Image (cartoon, grey):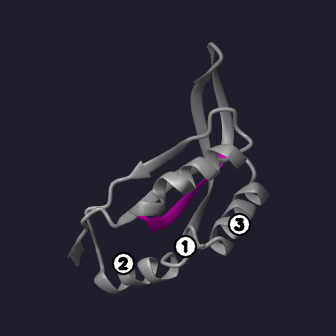
């Protein structure tokens, strides 16, 4: 395992709609802004919204990219998400297999 020096970012994003999540994944992969995304299906979320407690079914997507693209991906996600206030957050990465890290860097290296 290799210690990370700010090169890898995992973004945690919630969706109510699998089709939108899959579209976002495809668009970001095509643009080479992410190397990979994982969908974690079916969770129930409880949260405050507009003064009352809400409950809804959601799924999680983990977007994997290089740190230098993090802000661009976050901005894209917030601009294209159906939620008024989407959950778009970075998860800390402490260590990663060196070959896996290199793969992410290779797949997002020439994104434009």
Q: Comparing marks 3 and 1, which lies closer to the viewer?
A: 3
Local secondary structure at mark 2: helix
How far across and how far down the image is residue 7, in percent? 33, 67
Which numbered disc flags the more N-terminal residue, 1 or 2?
A: 1
Is 105 placed left or right of 36 in the picture?
A: left
Magenta-highlighted stretch: main secondary structure?
Answer: strand
Cα gap from disc 3 to disc 2, whole angstroms:
22 Å
Q: Quadrant of residue 19?
A: bottom right
Residue at x-position 25% and y-position 62%: 94
For label 1, the residue is 36
Q: In this view, does 99 lie above or below 83?
A: below
Which numbered disc flags the more N-terminal residue, 3 or 1?
A: 3
For label 2, the residue is 101
Cα gap from disc 1 to disc 2, whole angstroms:
11 Å
Cα gap from disc 3 to disc 1, whole angstroms:
12 Å
Query: As drawn, which residue projects farthest toward the front?
Result: 112
């Amino acid at each position: 395992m290799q210690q990370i020096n700010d090169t890898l970012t995992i973004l945690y994003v919630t969706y109510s709609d699998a089709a939108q999540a899959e579209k976002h994944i495809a668009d970001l992969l095509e643009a080479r802004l992410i190397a990979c995304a994982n969908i974690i299906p079916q969770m129930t979320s409880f949260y405050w919204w507009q003064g009352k407690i809400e409950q809804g079914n959601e799924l999680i997507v983990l977007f994997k990219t290089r740190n230098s693209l993090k802000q661009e991906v976050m901005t894209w996600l917030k601009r294209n998400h159906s939620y008024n206030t989407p959950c778009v957050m970075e998860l800390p990465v402490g260590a990663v297999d060196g070959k896996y890290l290199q793969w992410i860097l290779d797949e997002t290296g020439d994104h434009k």
